[in-house]
Image: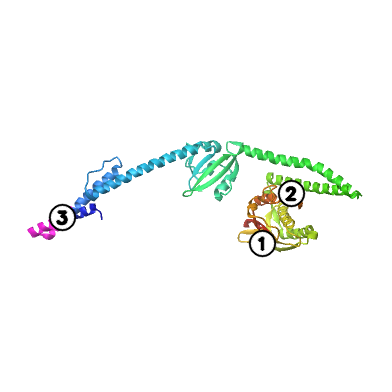
Amino acid sequence: MNNLWWGECRRISAVLLVALVLGSLLGATMLMLLLGIAAILGWQLWNLYRFIVWIKKGRKAEIPDQLGVWGDAYYQIHRLRNRQRKTAGRLASLLGRYKALAAALPDGAVVLAEDHSIEWMNRAASELLALDRSTDLGKPVDNLIRQPVFSRYLRAEKYQEPIQLTAPTSDERMLQIYMVPYGQDQRLLLARDITRLHRLEVMRRDFVANVSHELRTPLTVMSGYLETLLENDSNDKMLSSALKQMNAQTERMNHLIEDLLLISRLETENSAGKQTKVDVPAMLNSLLMEARTLSAERNHVISMKVDNSLCLQAVENELHSVFINLIKNALQYTADNGEIIISWFADDDGAHFSVKDRGIGLAPQNIPRLTERFYRVDAGRSRAVGGTGLGLAIVNHVLKNHQAALRIESMPGKGSTFSCDFPARRIIQS
């Protein structure tokens, strides 16, 4: 207990002592004590009233001259007010700088409340999203940006990946939309103009598709002549060896062109309307026979565990491409007489296709890049086994079109497991 409180206690004690002495002299001890207590209480109530009036006047009111604990209370509140004023000043300065920074961003920024109503936006957001900063504040953003893809993205509340949509101001302008959750159920919507990148991507896809189409004809002609020459059984061993190598490389180029055309088609076509019930067990039985044929003299031990009642809503030829690519990978990178296990099953998370091998395995740093086009862990080995470097890129594209994901587990020297995880809503029980 500090000196102020000791002083207050002494003053109260003095008042009570005086009341007691007077009461003894006048023969009315209890009455004088009650009057003393009433005086103390009245004094404290009067100080409390003055204190509340002072607080209501705000920080502009002067501190009253007061001794004891009440004087200390005035002083402490005054100190807190000064500290709060300085903190508020710093926060206001930071907020001002934040708003200036956000306003200067080339990307659109929109602050959304829990109900997706607009709390604030910068100038770029007004221009990119056709919003009005004077009239649209407080309105739900999905009432102002009326595009189905945006509404689904907003309702799904899964913001790991951005979406692309045409700008409300122009159909020729492409935007990339990010949603960043923060604070108490608030969200920051970021809109970026990617028109130039989108045009470059379209040009790249068109270039790949056109060049692939143009290469098909000369390669077909070359393949035809090479097959004819090989059938003539030339006695010249050097010529025969050269023709075989030329034919093998021509076939490899044909496979590469087919894969490039398939990727181009997957990127440009909407396959949602082509989805049907796919009898996956029947497809896998056919692929098992094809795998054993491809294995041939290498004598891989290929086994299959399949739920024969489990079908899938999908595009059949695309699904076939995924499964055969993963099976071929396992065949190519598993040593002779090695084991390969193909599985098709369902659980609470959805349907799963997996190919497990006892091959060379992969280092952890290589796994994230496997679905990149032409990425090779070992370029020399990949070309030796005839890979195009596009198989897993095709798998990744098809799975994305089916709202599925590729999962890879691998250890060097112990083999790999490539799994395709399909959402439960695509399962059809036969």
Nearest to N terminus: mark 3 or mark 2: 3
Q: Report which residue position mark 3 lands on.
A: 14
Q: Residue at x 43, y 41 (%)?
A: 94
The answer to whether residue 28 is magenta is yes
- The picture places residue 271, in percent across and down from the top left corner, at 69, 48
- The picture places residue 97, in percent across and down from the top left corner, at 45, 38
- The picture places residue 30, in percent across and down from the top left corner, at 13, 60
Tell me the element at label 2.
loop
Q: Residues in magenta?
A: 17-39
The answer to whether residue 193 is magenta is no
Tell me the element at label 3.
helix
User: Could you say which is closer to the camera, residue 314 or residue 37?
Assistant: 37
Labels 1, 3: front one: 3
Q: Report which residue position mark 1 lands on.
A: 345
Q: In this view, does 178 lie above or below 420?
A: above
Q: Report which residue position mark 2 lands on.
A: 388
Q: Is residue 417 left or right of residue 94?
A: right
Amino acid carrying mark 2 in the image? Thr
Quadrant containing the C terminus in the rendered view = bottom right
User: Could you say which is closer to the camera, residue 5 or residue 129?
Assistant: 5
Q: Which residue is drawn at 30% across and 46% down?
A: 77
Tell me the element at label 1.
strand
Residue 61 in which image quadrant:
top left
How far apart are the alpha carbons under marks 3 and 2?
101 Å
Check disc 3: other Cα within 10 Å, few if <14, some if 14-19, many if 20+: few
Amino acid carrying mark 3 in the image? Ala
Check disc 2: other Cα within 10 Å, few if <14, some if 14-19, many if 20+: many
